[in-house]
Image (spheres, rainbow, N blue to C red):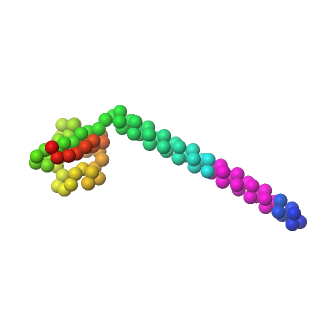
Amino acid sequence: MTKAERIIELLHIISNKSERIKKLKLDCGHQATKICVLNLRNKELEDKVGKCLWTQDEDGIYDTDCDNRFELLEGIPKDNKMMYCPYCGLHIAQAWKG
């Protein structure tokens, strides 16, 4: 094989790899778009389903929208990484001292 033929062969290999890289980038872009759309849909569904509002009484016990009570020994639900009501499963909307 001559040098010219080898160079042509290498250019062809590089070209093919470049096309594969472009395709991978496109695939990654499509996947990222799908993830963004799914996150938006999740938020929309969450907003439609609603949230469980927690209010803290004078004794520090939380009353929930789903008619339950919950007591934390320290901090607020957010401090304790509580995102969902353990009774109804909805997002905890807000927790404050009442």
x, y percent for residue 52 = 26, 39
Tell whether position 11 is magenta. yes
User: Could you say which quadrant of the image residue 54 lies in?
Assistant: top left
Q: Magenta stretch? A: 9-24
Q: Is residue 45 left or right of residue 95?
A: right
Q: Residue at x 44, y 42 (%)?
A: 39
Residue extending furthest right?
A: 2
Tell whether position 67 is magenta. no
> Total of numbered circles in the picture?
0
Q: Residue at x 27, y 51 (%)?
A: 78
Q: Is residue 34 visible?
A: yes
Query: Which quadrant, please, contains the N terminus?
Result: bottom right
Residue extending furthest top?
A: 48
x, y percent for residue 58 = 10, 46
x, y percent for residue 7 = 82, 63
Q: Main secondary structure of the magenta part?
A: helix
